[in-house]
Amino acid sequence: MSRVETFTASSPIDFTNPRPSPHSEPLGFSHRGSSLPWSTNVLVDNLSSSPTLRLTASPILGANIPFNDNIFPSLPPLLHGHPDVHLRNGVMNAYSLAATHDPDAERAFFVADLSQVYRQHLRWQACLPEIQPFYAVKCNPDPYVLRLLAALGTGFDCASNGEISQVLDLGVDPSRIVFANPCKAVSFVRNAGRVGVDLMTFDNADELYKIARAHPGAQLVVRILTDDTKSLCALGVKFGAPLVTVPGLLAKAKELNLNVVGVSFHVGSGCYDPSVYTDAIVRAGAAFDMGTEAGYQFSLLDVGGGFEDALFEQAATFLTAAIAAHFPDRRGIKIIAEPGRFYVSKAFSLAVNIIARRAPLTEAPSLAQDTSLDQPSVMYYINDGVYGAFNCIMFDHQTAHPYVLSMGGSFHVMDSEPVASSSVWGPTCDSIDCVCPSTPLPSALRVGDWLGFDNMGAYTLCAASQFNGFEVGKVIYTTGGFHASEVRSALARFAAQGHGL
Ligand SMILES: *Cc1c(COP(=O)(O)O)cnc(C)c1O
């Protein structure tokens, strides 16, 4: 059994207590309390009310599963158990590293729950059984995520040579890749031809000339412009041929002896009004007719990405109805999609350490009388920021919502804990590095405590920089709670075929 040690938690820096918050009512800050959805291990259950942290000597294991059953020797360990358990273990591990004066003891870290990716795939298959997902690699090219999706049989949307080789290196057949970048370097087009990636998108005439020169046997997909105004990240300003230009493009493709096989679109990433899929399908139907007029017989409809976790079922309903209405005869037509964030956003959580704390420059002298909580009374500095994983705030227009992971050496935070409006900042020396301008957090939070952020799987790690010398957090992988055995056997089968090792 795991060895259990206890030690007194202490913050590396001892702050004097500020005056207590005047706000006795909780403002609804988030925390996880001790309510693990399920727990297989007594170590976790007993942590709650204790002022000390119990240090586990090894990752928490499922009952009968041997520890050393890593499927891919080249990758970090694949652990068992609920992600919350690993968030807590990571925090406890940081405390023990601090005790040995590790230079990076309190480093931020991710926990990735692969069973969450698996469940999204089940959801996809249940709601859109006719549409084959081609995962958009750019969203999160995590090695375990790619292996799991490859094992589950999805295709991949790649945008560069780098993404193509990352996927091919896993043993994925090139026919399972769509090179879905309508504006490619000519050397990338040539390389795609060399490695057998034939399916690729275009939205302009120059691309046709390049492809005719560098990969004349390609199977082309015309990317059309659709309404992208209902999304977090509009893409239409950069990509997509307006319908009026499509006949001309198809005529040019014919002239160049190129094979156009279908139509694609993208409603914009992070689509918050899935009714736009209806209009997009109408336009795709029109583009199919243009294909027929140009002498092609289109056989591929690519409905792109944009699927939001919370709105997925709604989007699927709109899509299914629109496809039924505008593609009544689907014989001979293959339908694919390029979901990115849908698969990964909820699968990754991030734990960050509060490394510093200070008062704002202009502190309101009597916040007690100030009914508006918009003016933060505390500034917390954490060890990841907008130059790191929180680049999603800049590039992906996200809002970060912290919760308290550990406070004062305990994982248990009372609901009645007084809170104060706070701001949260990244570790770099740039003032643009603000993670939350204003959010309620317990006023008892100190340097050394930990915050957690959920939904950190999409467009986070992949675009993080090391600006100012701050490294991106490592990822701790788990096969999660429910569906852990399905995940493990899918990965094991994949590895047994010699893939991804
Ligand atoms: C980014 C991108 C995607 C993925 O979009 P999500 O909103 O993450 O689903 C799909 N296709 C293309 C061409 C993209 O550029």
Image (spheres, rainbow, N blue to C red):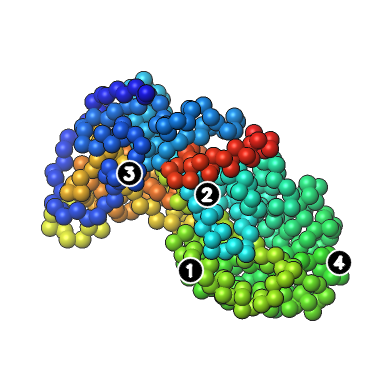
**Element carrying mark 3:** loop
Marks 1 and 3: in contact by CB < 8 Å? Answer: no
Q: Left of 152 or right of it: where is 185?
A: right
Image coordinates of residue 39 in percent, x first then y, are 34, 39
Residue plotted at (69% across, 45% down): 172
Q: Find residue 256 and report its image quarter.
A: bottom right
> Can residue 387 be seen here?
no
Q: Which residue is mark 4?
A: 256
The numbered dot on residue 314 is 1
Local packing at callout 2 (Cα closer than 10 Å; few below 14, some 14-19, many 20+) is many
- Real-space CA distance between mark 3 and mark 2, rounded to the nearest whole angstrom: 20 Å
- Real-space CA distance between mark 4 and mark 2, rounded to the nearest whole angstrom: 43 Å
**Element carrying mark 1:** helix
**Element carrying mark 2:** helix
Image coordinates of residue 340 in percent, x first then y, are 56, 55
- Real-space CA distance between mark 3 and mark 4, rounded to the nearest whole angstrom: 61 Å
Counting every numbered tag in the picture gives: 4
Of the two numbered discs 2 and 1 on the same chain, state the one appearing first in sequence. 2
Q: Which quadrant is home to the N terminus?
A: top left
Local packing at callout 3 (Cα closer than 10 Å; few below 14, some 14-19, many 20+) is some
Q: Which residue is mark 3?
A: 36
The numbered dot on residue 254 is none
Q: What amino acid type should be assigned to the residue bearing mark 3?
A: Leu
In the displayed structure, 472 sits above or below 431; it is above
Local packing at callout 1 (Cα closer than 10 Å; few below 14, some 14-19, many 20+) is some
Q: Nearer the viewer, mark 2 or mark 1?
A: 2
Q: What amino acid type should be assigned to the residue bearing mark 1?
A: Gln
Q: Which residue is mark 2?
A: 118
